[in-house]
Image: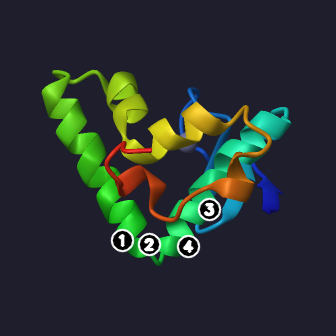
Amino acid sequence: MKIIRNRLLPLGQRHSAINLFGILFVKPGAHISDQLLRHETIHSRQMRELLYVPFYIIYVAEWLWHLARLRGDGYRAYLAISFEREAYLNQNDTEYLKSRRRFAPLRRHDS
Ligand SMILES: [Zn+2]
């Protein structure tokens, strides 16, 4: 994964890294752990299988839907996004990316 350290992205203080089209933008002093890399690699897989732009459209639509449902709690809305749920659920599993099913976050939880 290509990593670019910079001061601008991600915006704000809550996150230390953001994955844009498979390129990871990281704040200058932030530690890049194996867990973070795995989390972002899961996002890269999600993006690629949805051909990138639809990934962001669905991501933002889900966030807005959860934001309304959770009465404006932006952080909980972020954690509820299906793409984030898959990434957080599996970021500690070193074997996950070897066996991940395509479109995993959009499937019903039947396996
Ligand atoms: Zn994430």
Task: Look at label 1 and name its amino acid.
Answer: Pro
Residue 44 x %, y %: 62, 62
- At which x and y percent is residue 79? 42, 30
Quadrant location, ligand no. 1: top right
Q: Residues within 10 Å of mark 1 (few under 14, many from 20)?
A: few
At label 2, which amino acid type do we have? Leu
Q: CA distance from mark 2 to mark 4?
A: 5 Å
Q: Is residue 20 in sight in this rendering? A: no
Is 101 left or right of 91, judged from the image as shown? Answer: left
Check residue 48 in the rendering and tell me which mark sits there, or answer none.
4
The answer to which of marks 3 and 2 sits earlier in the sequence is 3
Amino acid type at image mark 4: Arg
Q: Which residue is mark 1?
A: 54
Mark closer to the chain start, 1 or 4: 4
Q: Residues within 10 Å of mark 3 (few under 14, many from 20)?
A: many
Q: Which mark, by number, is residue 68?
A: none
